[in-house]
Image: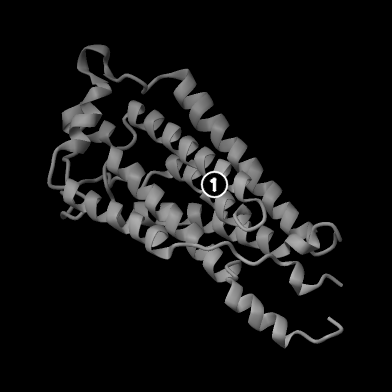
């Protein structure tokens, strides 16, 4: 039987930073809705003379950075689920059952929220707007949507979530392998950023769409970690006191 004491005590986590930074970023994004930043950045990737967004028909951006990269992350998610299931039967994996469960839960929630929000918010993609050769009318995130036969499905950024969902690795690893956790955090942020810029170049998303996605993914992964894995020293001490002597 695997002893509960094998579960590591959580490293100190500053919730004022972990929660405060994304909340501040979200507030900044709300304020930025009053500016033309999204439009200005989108125009950097648009050329009417070249027929639209510079990456719209890019083989690399669409086939490699979008389709193939997404498939690789899906494969990783499948392996995570397989690892979690195996942790119920394989002795070497049993001590990591909670971590694997937290990883699967985080990956699932950090991708599942995207489609429902797209349907509810009905935000148009840049490539659909009149300013960029489309037929739809631009509206801010918190504004009413203009009447249309084709509601948008572009907020938040789905492909960005494919990268930012890997924030889950940071939280799953932080108590056992802190150095690897930090490397995973950098990797997840970099991957999500690359995916975000790629979709911006294609006209699929505005800048703010992807930043909102990063905020949501971080908060979801943080919440899963807190409720599933977080075990500060005080909690561990109480568990040790209540543990039977022959456990």
Q: Position of residue 220 (x, y in %)?
A: 47, 59
Depth check, front residue: 154 or 73: 73
Q: How would you rate the neighbour count of disc 1 (Cα within 10 Å): few for under 14, some for 14-19, many for 20 or more?
A: many
- Left or right placement of residue 146 versus residue 62 in this view: left
Residue at image location 38% in from the left, 44% down from the top: 157
The N terminus, quarter of image: bottom right
Residue at image location 51% in from the left, 48% down from the top: 165
Q: Position of residue 179 (x, y in %)?
A: 61, 45
Q: Is residue 147 visible?
A: no
Q: Is residue 29 visible?
A: yes
Residue at image location 49% in from the left, 60% down from the top: 222
Depth check, front residue: 43 or 214: 214
- Left or right placement of residue 90 versus residue 200 in this view: right
Residue at image location 26% in from the left, 34% down from the top: 126
Q: Is residue 51 above or below residue 171?
A: above
Q: Can you identify the residue that label 1 sits on?
A: 166
Q: Quadrant of residue 211?
A: top left
* Element marked by disc 1: loop
- Left or right placement of residue 228 versus residue 222 in this view: right
Q: Is residue 55 above or below residue 169?
A: above
Q: Which colour assignment does the render follow?
A: one colour
């Amino acid at each position: 039987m695997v002893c509960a004491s094998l579960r590591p005590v959580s490293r100190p986590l500053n919730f004022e930073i972990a929660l405060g930074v994304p909340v501040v970023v979200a507030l900044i994004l709300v304020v930025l809705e009053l500016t033309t930043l999204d439009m200005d950045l989108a125009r950097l990737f648009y050329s009417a003379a070249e027929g639209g967004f510079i990456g719209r028909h890019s083989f690399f951006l669409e086939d490699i950075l979008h389709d193939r990269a997404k498939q690789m992350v899906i494969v990783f998610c499948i392996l995570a689920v397989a690892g979690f299931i195996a942790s119920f039967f394989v002795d070497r994996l049993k001590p990591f059952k909670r971590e694997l469960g937290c990883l699967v839960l985080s990956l699932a929630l950090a991708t599942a929220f995207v489609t429902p929000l797209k349907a509810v918010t009905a935000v148009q993609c840049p490539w659909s707007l009149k300013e960029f050769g489309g037929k739809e009318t631009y509206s801010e995130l918190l504004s009413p949507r203009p009447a249309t036969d084709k509601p948008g499905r572009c907020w938040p950024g789905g492909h960005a979530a494919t990268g930012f969902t890997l924030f889950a690795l940071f939280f799953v690893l932080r108590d056992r392998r802190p150095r690897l956790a930090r490397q995973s955090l950098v990797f997840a942020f970099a991957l999500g950023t690359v995916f975000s810029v790629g979709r911006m170049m294609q006209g699929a998303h505005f800048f703010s769409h992807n930043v909102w996605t990063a905020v949501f993914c971080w908060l979801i992964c943080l919440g899963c970690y807190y409720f599933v894995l977080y075990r500060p020293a005080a909690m561990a001490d109480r568990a040790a006191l209540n543990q039977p002597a022959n456990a």
